């Protein structure tokens, strides 16, 4: 940690931020590992509780739902309620012959309305805000990615003359932020593909 504080003492804040980013990236697997271990331990504890024969039926059903939703979150990284989990599996059954499951997961991340999903005419429906926010993320992601690439190229070109840490920091932040924004915006593409697949599934089922 002394090496991390040394640039601050020298007034070299660019080097400090670069070292901080590198440190966070290196520690990220350990952090995620701790979180994953906690979630698995919680599921094991819930399963142990369910072995209690004296549990009320309503409580037992509630805990079973908890185990299923937590297991789904560990497996796919998506938080869902029990009704949304049922809807997710229903969508998977209808479109799995055409689309990868990740498209369904992308739709679920947007928390669509699931009323009427038992009908063959069901389509993934989002709020107007979700469409606007998705378009904003797509546009913002492209801008940030472009900025990140430009800053990175400028950093590499000028590296032979001087170390411009600020350009490297801008590049890393813009690329990471742009990748995240673009990924969030691209969820709308999955909504389009899933709805087209649902439309074809309905026609084949009639």
Image: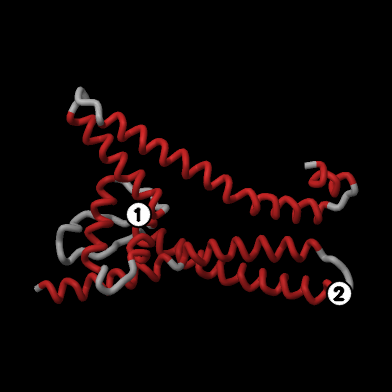
User: Residue at 86% across / 53% down in the picture?
Assistant: 12
Q: Position of residue 120 (x, y in %)?
A: 15, 65
Q: Give the residue at x 19% y 31%.
A: 58
Secondary structure of the residue carrying tag 1 is loop
- Residues 190 and 3: in front is 3
Please rate how many residues cluster around mark 1, counting C-alpha atoms within 10 Å: few if below 14, some from 14 to 19, many from 20.
Answer: some
Left or right: 87 in relation to 70: left
Q: Is residue 39 left or right of residue 154?
A: left
Residue, disc 2: 160
Which residue is outermost to the left?
Answer: 206
Marker disc for residue 111 = 1
Image point (60%, 50%), residue name = 28
Q: Report the residue that reaches farthest toward the top.
A: 54
- Residue at 65% x, 52% y is 26
Whether tag 1 and tag 2 are in contact, CB under 8 A, the answer is: no
Q: Where residue 1 sits in the image (x, y, percent)?
A: 77, 42
Q: Nearer the viewer, residue 84 or 2?
A: 2
Question: 79 left or right of 172?
Answer: left
Task: Give the tally of numbered discs.
Answer: 2
């Amino acid at each position: 940690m002394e090496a991390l504080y040394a640039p601050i003492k020298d007034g070299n804040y660019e080097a400090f931020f670069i070292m901080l980013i590198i440190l966070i990236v290196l520690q990220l697997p350990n952090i995620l590992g701790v979180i994953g271990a906690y979630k698995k331990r919680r599921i094991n504890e819930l399963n142990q509780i369910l072995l209690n024969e004296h549990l009320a039926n309503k409580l037992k059903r509630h805990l079973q739902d908890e185990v299923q939703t937590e297991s789904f979150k560990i497996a796919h990284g998506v938080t869902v309620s029990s009704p949304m989990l049922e809807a997710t599996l229903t969508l998977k059954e209808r479109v799995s012959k055409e689309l990868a499951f990740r498209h369904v997961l992308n739709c679920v991340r947007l928390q669509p309305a699931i009323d009427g999903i038992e009908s063959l005419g069901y389509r993934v429906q989002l709020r107007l805000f979700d469409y606007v926010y998705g378009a904003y993320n797509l546009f913002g992601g492209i801008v940030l990615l472009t900025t990140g690439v430009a800053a990175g190229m400028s950093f590499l070109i000028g590296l032979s003359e001087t170390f411009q840490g600020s350009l490297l920091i801008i590049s890393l932040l813009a690329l990471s932020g742009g990748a995240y924004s673009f990924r969030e915006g691209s969820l709308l593409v999955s909504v389009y593909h899933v709805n087209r697949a649902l439309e074809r599934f309905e026609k084949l089922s009639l």
